Structure formats: structure tokens, C-alpha cells
Amino acid sequence: MKIQKITNLLLILLLPVFVCSQESYRISLTKVIIKGTSNVHKWESTVGQLSGTATLTVDGEQLKSLNQARFDIPVKSIKSPKGKIMDNKTYDALKSEECANISFLLSAPSPDGSGNLNSKGSLTIACSTKAIDLTSTVKSLGNGEFSISGSKKMKMTDFGIKPPTALLGTMTTGDEITIEYEVKLVK
């Protein structure tokens, strides 16, 4: 009986050492840049707003798993240094009036223990939702905060987006874009 009490006491005292905690985080924007080409020049636009939440399993300063994540980007927060004409072409192509946000919903995360996060999710752009795979780099920023960064190549036409044109069709946008991202996970 005495041995069982000692064993139970040791288990109670040591249990926190072996248990990882699951915690809620806010996803905040560090940078998201959309890059593409045209028959005239390369172009890029910057996302100005992003909001989201995530649930992580954390062990000390190490991210063990990303269990749930969702974020939204208001389409009209996307800006180009080329000005309002480019911005308006972007908003039209992304159907900003019908679909005000670009959204991502995590469906299957898989940290590999080396600082990488391979995840699957649903990306909704211009009212069209597609399954995508993302490979991201995860860094601990200390104080229980993390940075997730990476890039993803995709085609506009995969989301039913007709690549924009200008100047009566003499300037055409390439179909392939690259999205470079870095977000911060804050408790």
C-alpha cells in the first residue's frame, strides 16, 4: 500500500514533464507577397492584413504539432507599388465583391522534427476552394512565440481566375504566381 502511494506521488510530480500542452495562438502578419510575371515585366503585390487562429501542441519552446489553423486575408488589403490600376485589376480577378477574403483552413499538419512543417489544407481564392500542400519552416522566437515561413507556386487558372490583361490585351499576366509568406504565432 505504501509503495503504491509513493508511485502515485511520483507520477503526479513527474507528469508535467512528459505532457505537452495544447495552446491557442493568434496568427499575425509578418509578410505575405504575391509575385508574378507579365509579357512586359515582373510584378508583385503585398498583403496588408491577415487574421487567424491556431491551436498548437508545444513542449517548452518546441512546436510539436499544429493541430488547427485558419486565416483570412481581405482581398482589398492587397496592394501593388504600381498603383490603383493594378490593384483594381487584382480585385476584379479575385472577385473581391463576391468573395471578400482569401481563406486557408488547415486539414492535416505533420511536423517532421527538423524545423519543417508539411501540411495540407483548403485554400479559397476567388470563391474557388482547392486542396493544397505547404512545406513551411518553423522557428521558435522565444517567449512561446513561433514564426512560420515558406513559399508556394500555383496557377491562377487552378482557382478559375483569368489572368488579367491591360492596354486592350497587349499586356498579359502570366498564369503562374508565387506566394511568399511569413506569419507569427502569438499566444
Image (spheres, rainbow, N blue to C red):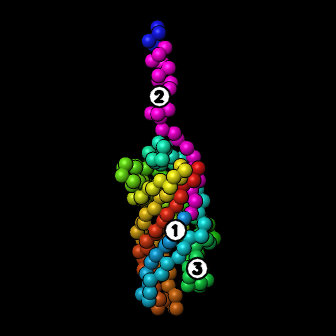
Point 42% across, 66% down: residue? 152
Question: Alpha carbon of mark 3 to alpha carbon of mark 1: how far?
Answer: 16 Å
Mark on residue 175?
Answer: none
State yes or no: discs 1 and 2 in contact (Cβ < 8 Å).
no
SS type, badge 1:
strand
Q: Residues within 10 Å of mark 3 (few under 14, many from 20)?
A: some
Q: Which of the pair 140/31 is nearer the observer?
A: 140
Point 47% across, 89% down: residue? 171
Query: What percent of the width, then of the height, locates residue 108?
Result: 43, 49
Q: Image height check: is 132 above or below 89?
A: above
Question: Alpha carbon of mark 1 to alpha carbon of mark 2: how far?
Answer: 42 Å
State yes or no: discs 3 and 1 in contact (Cβ < 8 Å).
no
Say which label, 2 or 3, has the lower sequence index: 2
Query: Looking at numbered disc 3 in the image, what kind of residue is underneath it?
Result: Asp
Span of residues in magenta? 5-29
SS type, badge 2:
helix
Residue 161 is a magenta residue: no
| Residue carrying label 1 | 32
Point 49% across, 78% down: residue? 44
| Residue carrying label 2 | 14
Mark on residue 87?
Answer: 3
Which of pointers 2 and 3 indicates the residue nearer the eye? Answer: 2
Q: Quadrant of residue 150?
A: bottom left
Query: What percent of the width, then of the height, locates residue 36?
Result: 45, 78
Query: What percent of the width, then of the height, locates residue 14?
Result: 47, 28
Can the viewer see residue 118 in this picture?
no
